Image (tube, rainbow, N blue to C red):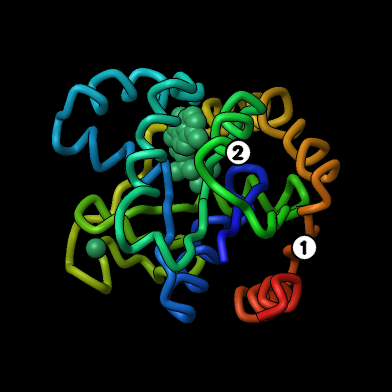
Amino acid sequence: MNFIFLGPPGAGKGTHAKLLSQKHGIPQISTGDMLRENIKRATDLGKQAQVYIDQGELVPDDLVIQMVEERLAQPDCQKGYILDGFPRTVTQAEALSKFARIDKVIDLVADTSVILGNLSGRRVCGNCGATYHTRRLNGATTCAACGGKLIHRVDDQPETILHRLEVYHKKTEPLIEYYKKADLIMDVVVESTIDHDFMLIEKALGL
Ligand code: ADP
Ligand code: ZN
């Protein structure tokens, strides 16, 4: 099965996509993680993407589309995958429809207060990319999984967060209508614990 996780930044796409990936053994394709990995390795793509990411802008469609098309052609994606953070524009969705068949789209619906709380307290391992929240870290500054140093992403600073939300409303939200027309959307309101919200997602996906 091929799934898309849609929703504003900070709604928990990455958290739930990772849980689903681990439990059901299908890869999580996070374009944000892939782009950050490219920045770390200082590839051409990483160098081109960094300015956009740091400013809370979207990376140009053609760069991201090519990256995803190559990734989905890999053997591990042939039994299914979870797209986390892609598509983010109608242009990306139209391109995707040419090289993928999507079975379901989960739209994570969250209150702005939840989103702002999630993003401002988010800390990310600079080594393995695991994400944490200050409310559960108890002051820890290193990654429980690998010992790497936890960082506060440049694009998780307050002004950039607000800008990312604007970009989401303008460029990504129209995808809800796009996938509604295709009869693929399932809304899931995230408002409870991670376990509870995850259960709702599995139910929506029929898993
Ligand atoms: P979040 O989980 O907070 O939504 P991501 O890790 O998914 O953040 O994305 C971080 C940044 O990477 C985005 O703000 C954007 O600059 C870039 N990015 C990720 N996915 C895409 C995409 N599909 N199209 C364009 N830019 C993207
Ligand atoms: Zn780590």
Looking at the image, residue 146 sits to the left or right of residue 111; the answer is left
| Amino acid under disc 2 | Ser
Q: Badge 1 local density, few (<14 within 10 Å), some, or many (20+)?
A: some
Sequence-wise first label, 1 or 2: 2
Residue at mark 1 to residue at mark 2: CA–CA distance: 23 Å
- Picture residue at 39% right of the left edge, 53% below the top: 123
Task: State the SS at label 2.
Answer: helix
Which residue is at the front of the view, 204 or 164? 204
Considering only vertical position in the picture, is 170 above or below 203? above
Kindly tell me whether mark 1's CB lies below 8 Å from ligand 1: no
- Picture residue at 76% right of the left edge, 31% below the top: 174
Which residue is at the front of the view, 1 or 156? 1
Which residue is at the front of the view, 25 or 95? 95
Instruction: Select label 1 or label 2 by which is in front.
Output: 2
Give residue 17's position: percent from left, percent from top: 52, 63
Looking at the image, residue 131 sits to the left or right of residue 37; the answer is right
Can residue 88 be seen? yes
Which residue was labeled with disc 1? 188
Considering only vertical position in the picture, is 207 above or below 155? below
**In the rendering, which numbered label is found on residue 97?**
2
**In the rendering, which numbered label is found on residue 109?**
none
